[in-house]
Structure formats: structure tokens, C-alpha cells
Amino acid sequence: MDLESTPALLKPVMQPQPLQAKHGGGEAFNAGSSMPEKRSLRVLVFLEASTVAGAVKPVLEFAQEAASASRPPIDLAMVLYQRAQQPSPLIDVVRQHGIPLEVIVERRAFDSHVLPQLRGVAQRLHPDVLWTNNTKSHFLVALSGLHQTAAWIAFHHGYTREAWRTRIYNELDRWSLPRARRVVTVCNDFARQLRRKGVRGDRLHVLRNPIRVSAPIADAEKARLRDELGLNDRPVLLSVGRLSAEKGHADLLRAVAQMRADQGAAFRSRLLIVGDGPERRNLESLCSTLKLDDVVQFTGYQADVRRHYGVADVFVLPSHSEGSPNVLLEAMAAGVPIVATAVGGLPEVLSNEVNALLVRKQNIGELAGAMTRLLHEPQLGQQLAEKGREVVAQHDPQSYFRGVVGLFQEVMGEAAAA
């Protein structure tokens, strides 16, 4: 039986044990290690990505902090899904971090065989806390009944709509998320959306994504990338992110075409689009239609984007919907001035003319005008970048770690009092 018959399966299909606070005993994540006098808190994280991008980055930042923090002691393990014959670089990254890993094998979309695998993992590891990171795992944890065996905290990072199965999981959040002990999201705009989906206000928590500031890229490395991409001394517009419709890259291409038309022979800029996704072929086709093939470069997915930030004069985020995007924080940490659409959680952290230039979504003229302004007013760009670093300072990984651990302690305290 497969999960295509989803409506008939909207109930737990196991008889779970009631949630209890665990203060000792049971199997440790690291088998064979000596058990401390007061054992660590066991956290099981469910990830749905195959690369280190988007919602995965805060989890890895948390894992890095957990590995270095002495109190409270946390044992973290991760669950990833993998289809046969499909590569998953994220699996290698998790193992390189030394994080215990469980791989759930899928044969197809909505494969019911994942349910006994998930239960088996939970029965072996005895987690205190379940951390789900996307709609699919929200649904599977609720469906399997695991939310009744451990404290479940669901992390919501927004919705994409490019695949039919993704749209189904998005709608199933109405059934799944109200069952979570806490629902953590990245901005107040998303919190309002979740209330409309039936999540209780007292279970909602806003916690913005963290950013770890890296050392600046050396000038020689920047020069090497400029040479590789044939940029010479031309101004560089940069956009980084998944190539899906809600990210607004088609608007960006049209805005660059308008800039070129307005500036004529004076136009010298180049646009780098870093990332991959279902819209890539459509965007490449649009690029040709707009006669921008000599202006735009699609680099594909890049595991390390620091070099690209290093050569950028302006970072552009043309999204139709956003929460707390990692790429925005990364660009500000690299000192790149920002042009972004005033959508979702962006106006909660950005102020127009203070630390960014904000434009209305899908407004090609405003987007083109803001990019042109920053290219022609470097002093303004420098001022915005300096203020952007102040925003970055408010998103440090240590604060994020403390915020998440505080939620763990809340839900475990509630379980102990029940």
C-alpha cells in the first residue's frame, strides 16, 4: 500500500507509547560510550534535502554548536531520505561532521515503506525530541505516531510549489502541524500564515536563521574567479538561490534587460545566477529570448558561494515569498549591498534606504532602478553594507543554539509535568 491513498491514512497506524520525560536509561545514540551521571538530551532531526542549502544550514550550525557546548549535553542524530540511484552530497557532509546518520530508503514518492523504517529508527534511538524541518517529515512523523513517543518540534521555513507532491505536503500541514508541541518559523509573516492553518498561537515561536561569518576571501581568489568567469573589470550583479518560480528570477532577467535597454552602449554589467532547480531551463530560455546570453551566467549549484559574494557589487533577491533567507545573511556578512523585494519576513529585518534597497515584488521597473542606483552610487552601497553587518550580528549561531535549546527544555518540562 502506497501513500497515494493519503486521505485514508490520516491517522497514526501504530499504537505508540505515551510521551514521557526521559531522565535516564535507554540506548544512547553513541553505542558503547560511557553513560554520564545525567545523560544527554537525545535529538533526532529529519532532513529532506540532498545538498547543503536553505533550511539545512541552520541545522548544521546547531550541530556545530552542540558539538562544542558543554552544557546542556546534546546527542544529535539525523535522518535523511534517499531514492535508489540518486546522489545525495548531504549524506557525505553529515558524515564528515561526525553526526550519527540514518538513511531512509524510498522507492518512489509517497512510499509507505518509509513508515516502518522511521518507527524502527525511533525505537533504536529512543529520542527525547523530534525535530522535523519540512512538510514531508511533518506529515510522516504525525502519520507514524512518532509524535506521541517523543516531544515533537516542527521547523517551518516556508512553502515552494513547483512539484505536485510538494503542493500536497503543503496542504497536509493543516493536519500535521497542529499536533506538534512547538512550531518554529523564521518570521512573523509565516507565523500569521500558520495560525490560519490551525496552529495554536501559544505553540508558535519565531526564531530567525543564524549566520556564521567567514573570513574574507583573498583578493587573489577573487581575481581567479573573475578570470574563470570572464568578468574582467565589469560590475557584477549576483543572485543566489534555488531556481523555483517563487524566487522571482524571471523578474530579475527582465529587469536586467530593461537596464540594458535604458543604458544602451554604456551598459557593462554582468549577472551571475548561482543555484539550480526546476525553473533552470525556463530561465535559460527566457534569457535567450531577452538576448541576454552575453550578460547572464548560470553557474549551477555551488557548494561554496563565498567566492561569488567576493566578486559581487550588488546582491539581488527578487523573491515573491521569503522568510529569513540564508543567502541574504551571507551577502550582508560578505559586505555586499542588497536589493530585495519587500516580501514575507524581509521587511522585519531590512529597512529601505538604511541597510538595503527594498522594492515591490514583480515590479520590474523598481527592481531595475534599484540595481542601477547601487551600481552608480558606490558610496550608498557602502553605507548599506555597513548597516547590513549590524543585522548579521543579531543572527549569530550561539544565540540560535540557545533559542532552540530553550524550546527543548520547555517541551521536556511540559512532558515531565503531564
Image (cartoon, rainbow, N blue to C red):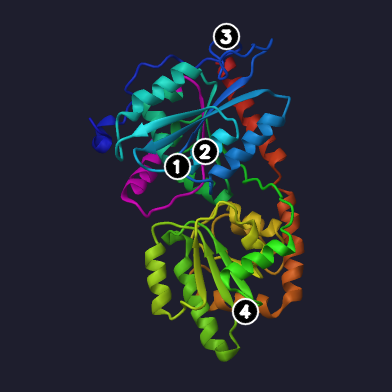
**Res 131 label:** none
Q: Is residue 412 above or below residue 37?
A: below
Q: Residues within 10 Å of mark 2 (few under 14, many from 20)?
A: few
The residue labelled by disc 1 is 88
- Whether the magenta-drawn stretch holds residue 153 is answered as yes
Residue 394 visible here: yes
- Residue at disc 2, secondary structure: helix
Nearer the viewer's eye, disc 3 or disc 1?
1
Whole-angstrom CA distance, mark 3 to mark 1, is 34 Å
- The residue pinned by badge 3 equals 25
Name the residue nearer the viewer: 95 or 135.
95
Report the quarter where the N terminus lies. top left
| Dot in front, 3 or 2 | 2
Give SS at disc 3. Answer: loop
Q: Are marks 4 and 3 in contact (CB under 8 Å)?
A: no
Q: Which residue is mark 4?
A: 372
Q: Earlier in the sequence, mark 3 or mark 2?
A: 3
Residues 170 and 69: in front is 69
Q: Earlier in the sequence, mark 3 or mark 1?
A: 3
Q: How crowded is the residue under tag 4: few (<14 C-alpha within 10 Å), some, or many (20+)?
A: some
Label 1 close to label 2 by CB (< 8 Å):
yes
Residue 205 appears at what percent x and percent y?
59, 39
Q: Nearer the viewer, residue 342 or 164?
A: 164
* Disc 3 to disc 2, C-alpha distance: 31 Å
Q: What range of the chain is rendered magenta?
A: 148-175
| Residue that badge 2 annotates | 92
Q: Distance between the Cα atoms at labels 4 and 3?
A: 63 Å
The kind of residue tagged 2 is Asp
